[in-house]
Image (cartoon, coloured by chain):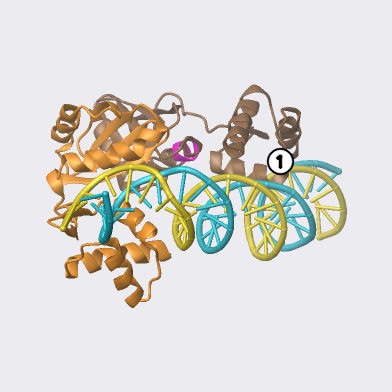
Chain colours: A brown, B orange, C cyan, D yellow
Amino acid sequence: MLKETRQQKILSLIRGRRIGTQEELTAHLERAGIVATQSSVSRDLIELGVVKQRGAYTLPQTPSGASAHGLLSLDAAGDALVVARCEPGLASALAVEIDRAALPEVVGTIAGDDTIFIAVSERRMQRSAIKKIWEIFQ
Amino acid sequence: MLKETRQQKILSLIRGRRIGTQEELTAHLERAGIVATQSSVSRDLIELGVVKQRGAYTLPQTPSGASAHGLLSLDAAGDALVVARCEPGLASALAVEIDRAALPEVVGTIAGDDTIFIAVSERRMQRSAIKKIWEIFQ
DNA sequence: AAAGTTATGCAAAATATTTGCATAAAAGTT
DNA sequence: AACTTTTATGCAAATATTTTGCATAACTTT
């Protein structure tokens, strides 16, 4: 699946270097053997939930320390999970909020004490799910 | 979407009369303005989970509102997950049943309150796992 | 064993998704 | 404010996926 390959490469590229424009990204992709135009890359970035921060494309940052509503971190795991860490005892309440939001990316959630496993339908949904979940708790 | 229309009509037809063959079904469908061959109907019936009971096509006593044992939905997520949603509080009990069934497709389960994450060994096992899990609760 | 019924491989047809082109819109710079 | 650069998006072509019918294998009933 070319699209998924390309999106994973995009994530890897922006993690490894400072990239400020979509044309730069397409050039890097081409060097990696992946041909795509700026328009496809634009759509990918939206789908991946990538943001531009201080002039560079980056993944949304996990706020450090005191977090919104006790949510501490959100990370992708495997190809279909997003794992949320929160203050002890808050997982259930946060999971209920996430369920209530009925995000199209989210298939289901399971809460422990300070951890929630959130299933998304596909790998490429992980990042946008993460972005949207942060937004729930702003 | 013709396929969904046709499947809904099939359900309505088998609810309203005794139908014993797929050719009979195609004839009824045609009378209702829906053209399809026996092979499409065969595939529809499988997809709809319709069974043949005492010589007639019928629906298994299944989820619709008051679902079998509280199981509401089953969906694939990523390559290796099937996510079950159920009535609140029932996840653990349902997960025990699923585990007890020892389906070859199912590697393991984790239950929350109204959600179960079911790990399957491979993506191509998801669909048959879903079908078999429904069958457990008939 | 023959007849009737259902399931399925294969490829064509239909439908859905993705993509590039062109350019509008937005953002950045001077 | 004007100009330049960057990003987003409408549209249709390209590509991918799903659905379908045909033919027939497989299964069931008589």
Mark 1 closeness class: few <14, some 14–19, many ≥20 residues within 10 Å: some
Of D9 and B67, the residue lying toward us: B67
Q: Position of residue B94 (x, y in %)?
A: 16, 35
Q: Nearer the viewer, residue B34 or A68?
A: B34
Residue C13 figure quarter: bottom right
> Can residue A118 be seen?
no
- Work out whether residue B66 or residue A84 is closer to the camera in this orientation and state it: B66
- Where, quadrant-wise, is the N terminus of chain B in this rendering? bottom left
User: Does the magenta-highlighted stretch encompass residue A129?
Assistant: yes
Q: Which secondary structure, mark 1?
A: loop
Q: Quadrant of the C terminus of chain B?
A: top left
- Percent across and percent down for residue A123 are 48, 34
| Amino acid at the residue labelled 1 | Ala
Residue B106 appears in view: yes
Q: Nearer the viewer, residue B69 or B51?
A: B51
Q: From the viewer's perspective, is B70 left or right of A25?
A: left
Which chain letter matches label 1?
A
> Magenta segment: does it hold A26?
no
Seen at 38% across and 37% down, the residue is: B77
- What secondary structure is the stretch in magenta mostly built from? helix
Q: What percent of the width, then of the height, locates residue D22?
A: 48, 60
Q: Position of residue D19 (x, y in %)?
A: 44, 57
Q: Which residues are magenta?
A: A127-131
User: In the shown orientation, is residue A135 left or right of residue A97?
Assistant: right
* Mark 1 lies on residue: A36
Quadrant of residue B92 within the rendered picture: top left
Q: Where A120 falls versus B9 (above or below)? A: above
Q: Is residue B30 above or below residue A38?
A: below
Q: Which residue is rendered at x = 64% and y = 28% of the image? A: A14
Is the residue C27 above or below the residue A114 in the image? Answer: below
Image point (21%, 62%), residue name: B20
- Numbered-mark total: 1
